[in-house]
Image: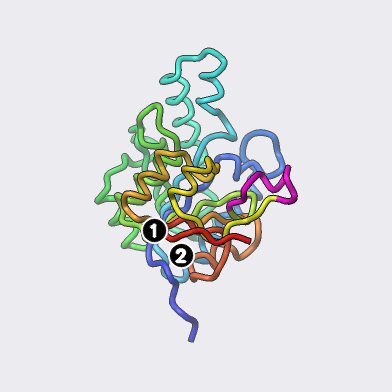
Amino acid sequence: MASAPHYRRILLKLSGEALMGEQGFGIDPAVSSEIARDVEEIRNLGVETAIVIGGGNIFRGLAASAQGMDRATADYMGMLATVINALALQDALEHQGVSTRVLTAIEMRSVAEPFIRRRAIRHLEKGRVVVLAAGTGNPYFTTDTAAALRAMEIKADVILKATKVDGIYTADPLQHPDARRFDRISYLQVLEQGLQVMDATAISLCMDNNLPIIVFNLRTPGNLRRAVMGEPIGSVVSVEAMADR
């Protein structure tokens, strides 16, 4: 008999860039389908799954703000981009036969449900995948912070942050081949060393509520399943002290 998943309810944080594949912009349907198959696999294990997705493949509010656009306006535009991605992911999931609901922090009832915490939890309890869009609904907050906030609200056991590399390194391993990977690192060490795991607000929120974060490579087939089964994969951010290699 197969062992039970280590985590009962998870929040998966995806960047908008995760949907691009090798493209420079937009959404690659083949990549969306790959992600959907991975999510279907863990849903079939009985893992209640919520997803927070970014919008950087379509519009980056911070970048537009740096070029002179009003920061609040730019951030709202970025939130709308996340809704586009959420609908694309919903479509990919439903093509896999996975019942999915998109809940958005900015109301647009003709395309998605408004985010209501109890409704989101009820969807999860019914076995539906919940895609949470539009960040927190407020400017000046990143989708990392939205992921931490929503994970707390739905009482997730862990945040799984999907990236292009297999964990947290002392430097960008794509540019620095000698960078060391952390198997486990504390929230404080992430903040003190300025490691680009999630932004400081999100890390602090997870630290205050003792919510672990697992950073792993989404592009390796089966990694999402390995993470929810509790296999040693990627890097774990928690209250525990550092161990690296």
Residue 105 drawn above or below residue 212: above
Q: Inspect the image, locate mark 2, and give the three-letter code of the amino acid beneath it.
A: Arg
Q: Position of residue 217 (x, y in %)?
A: 61, 55
| Label 1 packing within 10 angstroms: few (<14), some (14-19), many (20+) | some
Task: Quadrant for the C terminus, please.
Answer: bottom right
Q: Position of residue 86 (x, y in %)?
A: 48, 42
In the figure, is residue 170 to the left or right of 152? right
* Secondary-structure class at tag 1: loop
Residue 172 drawn above or below residue 142: below
Residue that numbered label 1 is attached to: 128
Q: CA distance from mark 1 to mark 2?
A: 8 Å
Residue 139, quarter of picture: top left
Q: Which mark is residue 43?
A: 2
Residue 60 drawn above or below residue 12: above
Q: Inspect the image, locate mark 1, and give the three-letter code of the amino acid beneath it.
A: Arg
Tell me, yes or no, whether the highlighted magenta stretch contains residue 174.
yes
Tell me, yes or no, whether the highlighted magenta stretch contains residue 245.
no
Please state which of residues 222 and 163 is positioned toward the viewer in this rendering: 163
Please state which of residues 192 and 167 is positioned toward the viewer in this rendering: 192
Residue 6 drawn above or below residue 70: below
| Residue 192 can be seen, yes or no | yes
